[in-house]
Image (cartoon, helix red, strand yellow):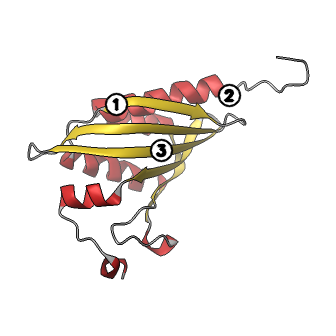
Amino acid sequence: MDAGTPRLTCAPRAFAQTEAFFAALESGELSQIDALIADGVVNTIPFHPSGATTEDVFRVFEGREQVMAYFAGAQQFIPEVAFVDPQITISASGETAFVETRGDMQLADGRAYENLYVWRLDFEDGQIIGIVEYLNPVTAALAFGRPLGPEEAN
């Protein structure tokens, strides 16, 4: 590194926190997730089974209480979670992590649930302030019995 290259002092921290976040999702230890997120955290799931891409169909959970309720609810439906070969990329600023991974999970009724994911985690002052969970909405809709198609955007 030459003298003109900025040092990313928060990059190792963001990497470690990203690993901790995914370990908590896999272990089901919600208290560990709670310790990593800021009070004002926002969790967004932008892909919709209707195929719509407008913000009005995004699933958005705002604040610690809603985000933790989302993860607790997800844990009830998907009690066995594993992420296969997660690839973590930290942004140049060190304030955002992207994770590409395959979910290899089991639903509460015993069925397998496999989906592809890209997650974005945004950090501020050592805590996660933003989570964006990109996944294949068709795979999720089929697994959870949600309707598909344009009429579902309304």
Residue 135: percent from left, percent from top: 39, 52
Q: Nearer the viewer, residue 63 or 131?
A: 131
Residue 121: percent from left, percent from top: 54, 42
Q: Amino acid at mark 2?
A: Cys
Q: Residues within 10 Å of mark 2 (few under 14, many from 20)?
A: some
Of callouts 1 and 2, the N-terminal one? 2
As drawn, 49 above or below 18:
below
Q: Nearer the viewer, residue 152 or 28?
A: 152
Residue ID for mark 1: 84
Q: Are the residues flagged by discs 3 and 1 in contact, CB closer than 8 Å?
A: no
Q: Nearer the viewer, residue 118 or 122?
A: 118
Q: Secondary structure at mark 2?
A: loop
Q: Is residue 90 left or right of residue 31?
A: right
Q: Amino acid at mark 1?
A: Val
The residue drawn where x is 46% and y is 38% is 100
Residue 16: percent from left, percent from top: 53, 24
Counting labels gives 3
Q: Nearer the viewer, mark 3 or mark 2?
A: 3
Q: Which mark is residue 119?
A: 3
Residue ID for mark 2: 10
Q: Residues within 10 Å of mark 1 (few under 14, many from 20)?
A: few
Of callouts 3 and 1, the N-terminal one? 1
Q: Is residue 8 left or right of residue 5?
A: left
Quadrant location of the C terminus? bottom left
Quadrant location of the N terminus? top right
Tell me the CA gap for discs 3 and 2: 19 Å
The residue drawn where x is 23% and y is 71% is 147
